[in-house]
Image: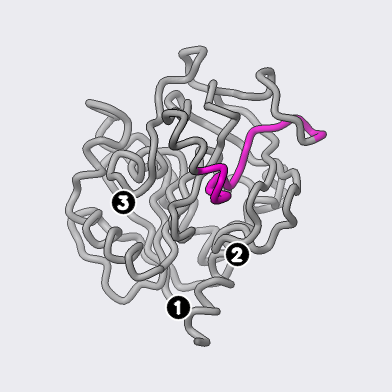
Amino acid sequence: MKIAVLQFGGSNCDYDVQYVLSEIIGVDTDLVWYKNELNGYDGAVIPGGFSYGDYLRAGAIAARAPIMNSIRRMAEKGLPVIGICNGFQILVESGLLPGALMTNKYPKFRCQWVNLKVENNTSPFTNEFKKGEIIRIPIAHMEGNYFADDSVISELNSREGVAFRYVDPGGNTTDEVNPNGSKQNIAGILNVQGNVLGMMPHPERASEEILGSKDGKKIFHSMIKYISSLVST
């Protein structure tokens, strides 16, 4: 089993993700430059950062990089792809996920811990959680305000395409705990097939107790568990 972690000019969470996958999860992981092809990989992570300085729009240039053709092929094959923060922005800009990510409602960079509610625990990225579980993971973004029209939001809700929502410790979705103004407190979404996840919070920054939480590790464990199930069949 081998996982690819993409690298663009301006990526800055790539080594963090590689460390978690290789040293904590224990899976073979490569850093792959955006000009290269993805051959022989069982999954991919598009990490956070500021690809191309967020020019035009966050993720807009990276979404048109050659390596995204490989990501599309992986997604079509049912292999797991996760985009974290800037990676989420790239997935949306590439059309692999619906909607848009706009400037935070209060227009400044937000770096803080948030509580998330696991809305779907049957996906390749959430199968290690209980449905409704409250987890603690940090955010670090300025353009994390998820927006989509009402029909898209309705479709996401009807097919359990919302993976995570921002909540208070009791699991309530309130405006006060929504750090960026995302519609319906959405923090992460899945594609129709469920094998592509985009999320603004950083699970790699919550994968060791010394960091303040190990909740994010379950997302990567879930991904590896899913890949193992594909291999066994």
**Is 175 situated above or below 45?**
above
Per the image, label 1 sits on a secondary structure element best described as loop
Per the image, label 2 sits on a secondary structure element best described as helix
**Is 120 situated above or below 185?**
below
Q: Quadrant of residue 139?
A: top right
Q: Are marks 1 and 2 in contact (CB under 8 Å)?
A: no
User: Mark 1 vs mark 2: which is more N-terminal?
Assistant: 1
Task: Say which of marks 1 and 3 sits in front.
Answer: 1
Residue at mark 3: 7
**Is 156 situated above or below 24?**
above
Determine the residue positioned at 37% across, 66% down: 30
Q: Residues within 10 Å of mark 3 (few under 14, many from 20)?
A: many
| Near-viewer residue (196 or 8) | 196
Q: Position of residue 133 (x, y in %)?
A: 75, 48
C-alpha separation, residue under disc 1 versus residue under disc 3: 20 Å
Q: Quadrant of the N terminus?
A: bottom left
Determine the residue positioned at 21% across, 58% down: 69
